[in-house]
Image (cartoon, rainbow, N blue to C red):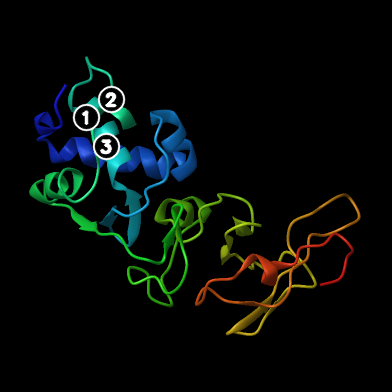
């Protein structure tokens, strides 16, 4: 198996369609890849894990063979990026704002006002990775995105500042967070301050 054998753009498109159908996390789990840390395929306003797309696309071009796994080839500037560019796709290089597959700060590929038809498309774009949860992040890395949909009566959306009271901790208590700046700066773990006390 050789990466250079991948020559069919329609195989890449098939992988992109499956990525959209499954969502980012399920697609990566199916093919055994971790989240991209630097290189993303850009298409129609969405960001895709470039190495995983290439591995899956190989299986679409050669259905009698297994898809390429994460250990079968290296990704990045010398391999996956030029391959996808030769096939007519745009690839975005690494940025210091990417942390473990999450993006902190302004998203150059998605200006304010970008539209997503549903949560699956939002997840596939990597703007907000969880397909259901309202907050994306962890206690160690911080929150990289929050979806406020009006589903919780205590949520407040004031444009530049939101108050998020989202996910349920138990049947009677809510996970609450401090006031969070919306998608513009890195939110440190100390600023998240989750609690299940019912008050921010």
Decide: is 126 above or below 3: below
Residue shown at the point (56%, 51%) measured from the top left: 130
Residue 150 in the image: x percent, y percent? 69, 69
Residue 22: name its quadrant: top left
Q: Nearer the viewer, mark 3 or mark 2?
A: 2
Q: Which residue is mark 3?
A: 14
Residue 160: name its quadrant: bottom right
Task: Tell me how far mark 2 sits from mark 1, CA to CA.
Answer: 5 Å
- Residue 23, labelled with which disc? none
Of callouts 2 and 1, the N-terminal one: 1
Q: Residues within 10 Å of mark 2 (few under 14, many from 20)?
A: many
Q: Residues within 10 Å of mark 1 (few under 14, many from 20)?
A: many
Residue 152 in the image: x percent, y percent? 76, 66
Q: Which residue is mark 1?
A: 58
Task: Tell me how far mark 3 sits from mark 2, CA to CA.
Answer: 13 Å
- Under circle 1, the secondary element is helix
Residue shown at the point (76%, 63%) measured from the top left: 194
Q: Is residue 136 left or right of residue 125?
A: right
Q: Nearer the viewer, residue 105 or 22?
A: 105
Q: Nearer the viewer, mark 1 or mark 3?
A: 1
Quadrant containing the C terminus is bottom right
Q: Is residue 134 left or right of residue 166?
A: left
Q: Which residue is mark 2?
A: 67
Residue shown at the point (68%, 72%) measured from the top left: 191
- Residue 69 seen in render: no
- Residue 86 seen in render: yes
Decide: is 164 above or below 7: below
Of callouts 1 and 3, the N-terminal one: 3
């Amino acid at each position: 198996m050789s990466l250079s054998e991948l020559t069919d753009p329609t195989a890449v498109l098939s992988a992109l369609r499956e990525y959209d159908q499954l969502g980012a996390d399920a697609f990566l789990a199916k093919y055994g890849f971790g989240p991209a840390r630097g290189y993303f395929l850009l298409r129609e306003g969405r960001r895709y894990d470039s190495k995983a797309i290439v591995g899956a696309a190989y299986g679409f071009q050669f259905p009698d063979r297994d898809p390429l796994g994460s250990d079968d080839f290296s990704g990045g500037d010398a391999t996956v990026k030029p391959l996808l560019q030769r096939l007519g796709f745009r690839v975005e290089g690494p940025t210091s704002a990417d942390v473990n597959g999450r993006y902190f700060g302004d998203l150059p590929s998605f200006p304010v006002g970008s539209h997503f038809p549903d949560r699956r498309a939002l997840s596939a774009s990597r703007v907000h990775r969880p397909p259901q949860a309202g907050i994306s992040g962890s206690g160690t890395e911080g929150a990289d995105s929050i979806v406020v949909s009006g589903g919780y009566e205590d949520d407040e959306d004031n444009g530049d500042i939101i108050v998020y009271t989202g996910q349920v901790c138990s049947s009677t208590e809510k996970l609450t967070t401090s006031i969070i700046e919306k998608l513009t700066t890195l939110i440190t773990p100390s600023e998240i301050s989750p609690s299940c006390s019912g008050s921010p």
